[in-house]
Image (cartoon, rainbow, N blue to C red):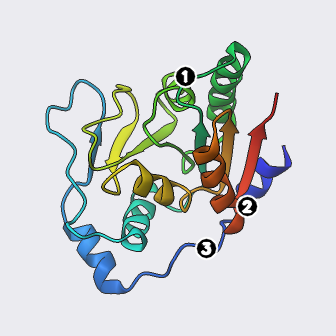
Amino acid sequence: GTCLRRALCRRPQAEAPVCASSARAARGSGSMFRSSGKEANASPTRPPVGEVARDAVARLAEVFGDGPRFCILGAQAVQNQDSDKIVKLFAKMLADRLDKDAVCITGGMEGVQRAFALACPKHLRLFNVIPGDKESSGYACGTDIQAGDNSEERAVMLSLLGDVYLVVEGGDLVAAEARAAVERGADVVPLIR
């Protein structure tokens, strides 16, 4: 309700400023993403060598655009069937209510994020931010984008990208991502059962 309405009207101010040269370099580095569907036959292009978190966030923000960003965080193994159903209903609700500039973002993980991604209608702009050590999300939906060398670095970047975070189940790592998002001014909607 209220968090979703606020997110449609503003963006948290914690995105790091980026100098023009790094923005140009990110734009000029070629395609940094590909569809995760079976029609794509090339592996995702890796981010520039030595890319730091600030530059990666700027690169991803450019791809996502200025619309509201909804990130999905959660357990890699769904413990409760009700959680799975709620995540799927949330994906459909967002698809019905969001404008064409909005994006939904997962970390390309199993469990909650996979359930959300697979429930997203095709017209919803879905991105799966995956670490450089992973070839693809394996979802066959949305667009995979590599950021960070491993899951820990990708998690840091994911916590810097969204306006609203839906948190479903999960442990200490998911809680740390959610805390980081709150600290920079994002809205976090926990699903507490």
| Residue wearing tag 1 | 119
Q: Position of residue 122 (x, y in %)?
A: 46, 28
Q: Looking at the image, which is closer to me, 174 or 130? A: 174
Mark 1 falls on what kind of element?
helix
Mark 3 falls on what kind of element?
loop
**Which mark, residue 14?**
3
Tell me: residue 3, above or below residue 191. Answer: below
Tell me: residue 108, above or below residue 10. Answer: above
Q: In which quadrant will I find the C terminus? A: top right
Tell me the kind of residue under disc 3: Ala
Query: Who comes first in sequence, dot 2 or dot 1?
Result: 2
Tell me the kind of residue under disc 2: Cys
**Which mark, residue 105?**
none
Q: What whole-number distance in Å separates the C-alpha atoms at marks 3 and 1?
A: 30 Å
Query: Who comes first in sequence, dot 3 or dot 1?
Result: 3
The reply, left or right, for residue 114 in relation to residue 12 is: left
| Residue wearing tag 2 | 9
Residue at left offset 49%, top offset 23%: 118
Tell me the kind of residue under disc 1: Ala
Judged from this view, the residue extending furthest toward the front is: 172
Contact, CB < 8 Å: mark 2 with mark 1?
A: no
Mark 2 falls on what kind of element?
loop
Disc 3 vs disc 1: which is toward the camera?
Answer: 3
The reply, left or right, for residue 21 in relation to residue 41 is: right
Tell me: residue 178, above or below residue 170. Answer: below
Q: Position of residue 115 (x, y in %)?
A: 54, 23
Q: Position of residue 61 (x, y in %)?
A: 45, 63
